[in-house]
Image (cartoon, rainbow, N blue to C red):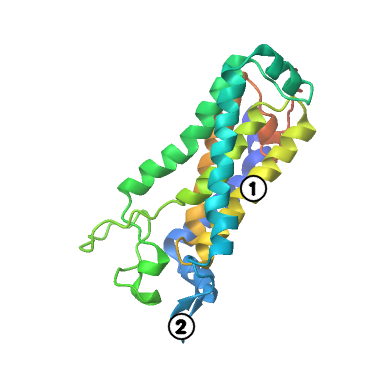
């Protein structure tokens, strides 16, 4: 009975994941999605990564805000109790252990992505022969030998900072606030990821994998450490929700 409930709740998502994984790994889907962002006549990307306004809004600016977010969590965790009581009144859970775990989860997402990037043989779009570079197109699980060195471009590192905001769902005491944090993380992660795609730094699949890693890390901690599956329910992966009390 439980297995049937599991499949009913998660079956469509599991099927979607398998279809996407197969499409990105065994078809030219990444190339098809990337081609519109590159002008083959002028050999230039749709967005110039050196253009200051776009770089400020979608690259340097988000990095500064995410560092401020991390410093804020550290200050809230180590600061006086009066700070935590004030934030708690806004609908957040502010117990020190939970704040510390949330900070670890937020840090573990970009760290995990960075570790995968350092061991990958996947090149960025701008490095490929197809887009004016010198490297071949390689997929993450390709068994082909590579003589051009390692690409270090999979998954998407820049977007991992935005998706790390999913860790805030661990502090939200109400479902409505948790839902807003999911939307915030998705908006931040995808805006940063799409900017990288538009300037040839990543394929779509790179950002999809980063998003999935962030979801897995956050929801596993939520379920295993806190015994709560509310974020999974918001995402349509669980049929049960238990309101978390601050």
Q: Give residue 167's position: percent from left, percent from top.
A: 60, 33
Q: Which disc, if any, is residue 242?
A: none
Which sits earlier in the primary sequence, circle 2 or circle 1? Answer: 2
Looking at the image, which is closer to me, 120 or 52? 52
In the image, is residue 175 above or below residue 126?
above
The answer to which quarter of the image holds residue 115 is: top left
Residue 90 left/right relative to 121: right
- Cα separation, mark 2 vs mark 1, equals 31 Å
Looking at the image, which is closer to me, 63 or 232? 63
Q: Give residue 135's position: percent from left, percent from top.
A: 30, 68
Residue 24 visible from this viewpoint: yes
In the image, is residue 214 above or below residue 3?
below
Number of marks: 2
Residue 38 left/right relative to 231: left
- Check if mark 2's residue and mark 1's residue have beta carbons within 8 Å: no
In the image, is residue 29 above or below residue 159?
below
Residue 211 visible from this viewpoint: no
In the picture of the structure, the residue carrying the numbered disc 1 is 186
Q: Which residue sits at x=70%, y=30%?
A: 230
Q: Give SS at disc 2.
A: loop
In the picture of the structure, the residue carrying the numbered disc 2 is 40
Q: Which residue sits at x=37%, y=44%?
A: 116
Q: Give residue 36's position: percent from left, percent from top.
A: 54, 75
Q: Residues within 10 Å of mark 1 (few under 14, many from 20)?
A: some
Q: Residues within 10 Å of mark 2 (few under 14, many from 20)?
A: few
Q: Which residue sits at x=46%, y=60%?
A: 202
């Amino acid at each position: 009975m439980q297995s049937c409930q599991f499949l009913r709740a998660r079956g469509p998502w599991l099927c979607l994941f398998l279809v996407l994984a197969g499409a990105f790994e065994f078809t030219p889907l990444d190339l098809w999605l990337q081609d519109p962002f590159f002008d083959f006549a002028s050999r230039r990307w749709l967005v110039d990564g050196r253009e200051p306004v776009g770089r400020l809004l979608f690259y340097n600016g988000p990095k500064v805000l995410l560092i401020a977010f991390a410093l804020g969590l550290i200050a809230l965790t180590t600061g006086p109790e009066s700070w935590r009581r004030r934030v708690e009144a806004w609908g957040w859970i502010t117990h020190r252990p939970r704040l510390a775990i949330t900070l670890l989860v937020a840090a573990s997402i970009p760290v995990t992505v960075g570790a995968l990037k350092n061991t990958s043989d996947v090149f960025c779009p701008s490095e490929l022969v197809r887009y004016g570079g010198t490297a071949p197109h390689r997929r993450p699980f390709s068994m082909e030998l590579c003589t051009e060195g390692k690409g270090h471009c999979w998954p998407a590192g820049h977007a991992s900072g935005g998706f790390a905001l999913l860790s805030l769902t661990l502090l939200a005491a109400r479902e409505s606030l948790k839902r807003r944090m999911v939307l915030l993380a998705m908006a931040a992660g995808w805006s940063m990821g799409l900017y990288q795609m538009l300037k040839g730094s990543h394929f779509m699949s790179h950002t999809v994998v980063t998003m999935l890693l962030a979801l897995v890390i956050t929801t596993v901690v939520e379920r295993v450490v806190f015994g709560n599956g509310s974020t999974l329910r918001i995402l349509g992966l669980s049929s049960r929700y238990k309101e978390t009390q601050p």
